[in-house]
Amino acid sequence: MHPVAWIVWSAAAGIVAMTTSNPFYLVVLIAAAAVVHSSHRRPGPSSRSFRIFLLGGLGAIVLRTALVVFGTVDAENAAAAALEGSRLAALLVVFGTFNSVADPFGVLRLAPRRLHEPALAAALALSIAPRTIAAVARVRQAQELRGIRIGRLRSLTALAVPVLETGMEEAMTLAESMDSRGHGRGRRSRYRPERWEVASGATAIVSGVCTVAFAAALLAGRGGLAPSTFPLRWPDVSPLLVVAAAGFALPGFLPAGRAA
Amino acid sequence: MSEAVLYRSVSFSYPGVRRRALDEVSLSVPEGAFALAVGPTGSGKTTLLRAANGLVPHFTGGTFSGRVVTGGRDTLDHAPRHLADVIAYVPQDPAASFVLDRVEDELAYGMENLGVAPAHMRRRVEEVLDLLAIEPLRDRSVRSLSGGERQRVTIAAALAAGPRILVLDEPTSQLDPQGAEDVLAALQRLVHDHGMTVLIAEHRLERVAGFVDLAIGCAAGRTTVGSPAEVLERIDSGPPVARLARMLGWSPAPLTVREARAIAGRSVIVPEAPVPAPDPFSPGAALLEADGLVAGYAEREILHGIQLRLFEGEVIVLMGRNGAGKTTLLRCLAGVHRPAAGTVRVRGRTPRPGVDIALCPQEPESVLYCETVAEEIAVTLRARGVDGRSEDELRRFGIEDLAARHPRDCSAGQRLLVATAAMVAGGPAVVLLDEPTRGLDPEAKAGLARFLRSVAEGGGAAIVATHDVELAAAIASRVVMLAAGEVIADGSPMQVLGDSRVFAPQMTRVFGAGWLTPEQVAAAAVPV
């Protein structure tokens, strides 16, 4: 799958998540992202970070709902808060999926020269989550061999300090390696340019179409995109938009092709 | 231009550090030379190498004076990326320097940055795949590679970009003896047949001394340059043949097995085999018993039925090629990895990791988090509920004078010892060490040997997984060889190492099976 196809998919899914807080659409979107993750995830720590983002999404819902205590606490308010949290959760899951299926440095190679530095910063930032997660597992296990059980607050430094230090060192080593090998020095060539295969094209096109569907609904003010919880009742659901949300699962059924 | 890399009065100190890492270094590495930088950790070797491609000072900051001219370009005026077409730098830790996912893409990365034409890139990638014998790995994810495979891929990626100068920091540290020899031989071919200039830093001199034509001795930031024989004569440690030469007064010191045989042939008479020590080693009770161990991971089985006994007072050295299953075996023995079949018993019961048996994993520095070395040890002692003093634990390694230092202020070799000490402090009688010698300079290695002897003498026992043949010759009471998940040899060092072409220590290669260390030979040698 061409890396740009993943960018298009993620951006489109993200935009859709921004347009609506309707839980039906969001749940379908999240499920679609999970399908894509499970079939296209890359081996290694980045795919484990998907689970972390999923948990983060759940955490967002819970936290956002809990904030209701600062105002009037009733079912309507809580439901409204939960819907807001769901939107954030969907964004996190989409991001987690992108992190797990697309190699940030594979994407970086395609960046035009002008955008080279911000693209590099973005690639490094994207690689931090999986690297940190891998480091946490390693450090925790090593500390346990010493008899230090990482659980209580006091022993958190035994986890946090090495993980942060390792993270910094790894980021520095990576940056050094890239610079030593000429990154950003001038005109680049492409070893094996990723071809726009059918799968990539289909992903990009379908993502675009689904986004248009939601955008149109937003402009027309229809489809129950922003359900009100006052009074508390089931939101309107347009079957067309449910299908559009489900459309984001398409890449999950397409062959991976050469790993990008 | 006959100098590949020229250092002119280079002085450098890292930011915030008063002591100079490089002190008025002036030397030249001629084009086409195979140069070796040698010296203890903290002596400036790595800084010297990193100054060649501009990482020092562009990436480090600090105070820099003097000039380094690489391939005709001043490194102060050129950032590392603008030197990438003439010089490639291969760092110590390959894992953290991989940029892309697939091996093949990683190999091409440097060439892409240099704008090499695609057809040319394809050819070069194939060439380096063959040169480093990594063709079967081309589609693999870099994260799935073993340590040795990673090292080869990093070297291949550096070579693919086609620089004239190659700088490598401890390139064979993770390779088994055969793998190390293959890589060094490939580098030598590049120097001799293609006129490349190679500059490497290496601690295990027995591996490289025969290949290099120029040596740079580093000590406290200052350098001395000369032929390998000249430089190694001045430093305390050297390959075993050089140490033997010093003991027997041979001059000039031989650097290779071949040279040593030539000199030995006409200078000394050495008996066929050493007289057995008056007190033959007799092990005590069985501390660890492993039977029928079958273990692996989701994708494949690694150990296919291991049987092993460890007795009181033994130091077993576990050897085998990369990927043979050494780490998996240690983890099973420590009780960290659950075997699919078979049993492990320590003193008759299932081992509790950290309690009955201590495991120090590869690259243990990542556990350090305290302000002082003494505190690191104290933390482990507390966690294990053991009453003890940090100083005593450190003394076992010979590093008690580091007690008040911050771990990050120690040299790399010292830090490794501190981390190892932190992992095994106050621990149980059985100690398992996974590749503890990687990155250890000779002085730190001596500290490790000291610790292992103290374990054995204290009624405990240790298993050390390592590629370091000379360390095995020096401290092992038994050698176990692993291949493809099975034990293929288990006996005394004389039997196992003496019998092997690949794993034989230098003394064995010169004087025959039975001779393991220079001290042993020197004691028995009779001058002609």
Image (cartoon, rainbow, N blue to C red):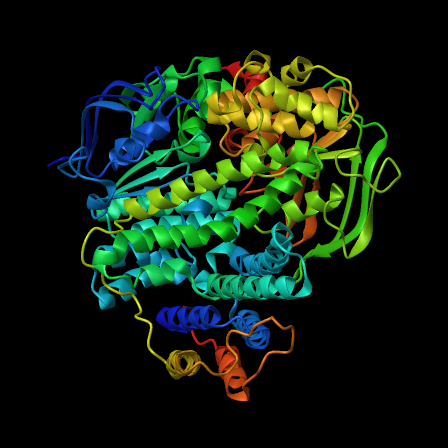
Q: Position of residue B340 (x, y in %)?
A: 77, 57
Quick check: B335 left or right of B447?
right
* Residue shown at 15% from the left, 35% from the top: B77
Q: Which residue is nearer to you in this view: B182 or B24?
A: B24
Q: Which residue is nearer to you in this view: B382 or A89?
A: A89
B306 relative to B499, above or below: below
Residue B374 is at least partly visible in this image: yes
* Residue shown at 54% from the left, 69% from the top: A37
Quick check: A205 left or right of B70?
right
B159 relative to B365, above or below: below
Q: Which residue is nearer to you in this view: B479 or A62?
A: A62
Residue B318 is at least partly visible in this image: no
Q: Which residue is nearer to you in this view: B409 or A68?
A: A68
Quick check: A252 left or right of A207?
right
B386 relative to A108, above or below: above
Quick check: A77 left or right of B44?
right
Quadrant housing residue B261: top left
> Which quadrant: the N terminus of chain B?
top left
How many marks on residues? 0
Q: Position of residue A133 (x, y in %)?
A: 56, 49
Q: Residue furthest left?
A: B1
Quadrant housing residue B30: top left
Q: Position of residue B151 (x, y in %)?
A: 44, 47
Q: Position of residue B40 (x, y in %)?
A: 43, 22
Quadrant housing residue B429: top right
Q: Residue furthest right?
A: B348
